Image: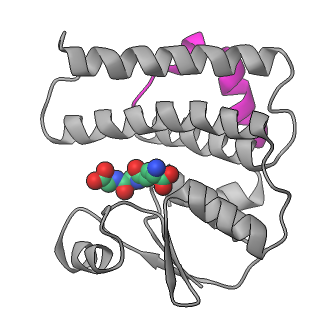
Amino acid sequence: MKLYGSTTSPYVRRIRIVLAQTPHEFIDLQIFGGKDRELLASRNPTLKVPCLEDEGEMIFDSRVIHSYLSEKLNLDPLTWEEENLLTLIDAANDSFVQLLILQRSEFDINDEKLYFRLQNERIEAVLSTLEAQLLEGGFSGWSYPEICLYTMVDWCIFRELHDFASYPTLLEFHEKHQDRIELTATDPRQ
Ligand SMILES: N[C@@H](CCC(=O)N[C@@H](CS)C(=O)NCC(=O)O)C(=O)O
């Protein structure tokens, strides 16, 4: 099994954590240029990471990869409630990725432009919902939704994309888990 990704991507990190106990090869790519981008293009026309190669098949998108691995590794399938949580997390995470790419393209993402406002509104709406769910006792274990929540928050902190001061419970959640071995082993800062 080969996982194509990058050490900084939050979407890749969640799959690396799921695969922690499973023998696999991790292909660490610089996805935005050069030979690595050519390799990615030859494997995955969406030009995104992660993607997984297994038994001659390519599997695209972390969500589909997770569902494939659940079946293959006999993990507990996600409930519809967990799928919904993932939709929330992915919506905010996708907007954060867009904002980072726009920043790198030298746009001022604080400009009053419709596109930026839509991303920022989505991010705040999702983070408020996640904060409320944490306050109600949600995300109390350590399974896939918690892993995806952690990797998103940690990536935003790492990239300095968001000030989480108005989400103290999200920050507490981050602090509570940060020393887990699978998280320190996949820390994008190393
Ligand atoms: N829905 C995808 C999102 C993956 C994604 O956006 N990955 C980013 C890296 S964090 C990427 O490859 N971006 C490249 C691009 O947008 O061109 C998934 O869950 O795998």
Based on the displayed image, in which of its 4 quarters is residue 166 positioned? top right
As drawn, is 110 to the left or to the right of 19? left
The residue closer to the viewer here, 148 or 71, is 71
What is the x, y in percent for residue 172? 73, 26
As drawn, is 171 to the left or to the right of 58? right
Residue depicted at 59% across the width and 30% down the height: 88
Magenta segment: does it hold 166? yes
Question: In the rendered view, would you say 184 is above or below 28?
Answer: above
Seen as rendered, the residue at the extreme bottom is 56
Question: In the rendered view, would you say 73 is above or below 76?
Answer: below
Based on the displayed image, in which of its 4 quarters is residue 80 positioned? top right
The residue closer to the viewer here, 38 or 54, is 54
Quarter in which the N terminus is drawn: bottom right
What is the x, y in percent for residue 137? 87, 21
Q: Which segment did they paint magenta?
A: 161-178
Residue depicted at 65% across the width and 41% down the height: 150
The residue closer to the viewer here, 44 or 177, is 44
SS assignment for the magenta stretch, majority: helix
What is the x, y in percent for residue 182? 72, 61
Colour scheme in use:
one colour
Question: In the rendered view, would you say 62 is above or below 5?
Answer: above
Based on the displayed image, in which of its 4 quarters is residue 45 positioned? bottom left
Residue 174 visible, this angle: yes
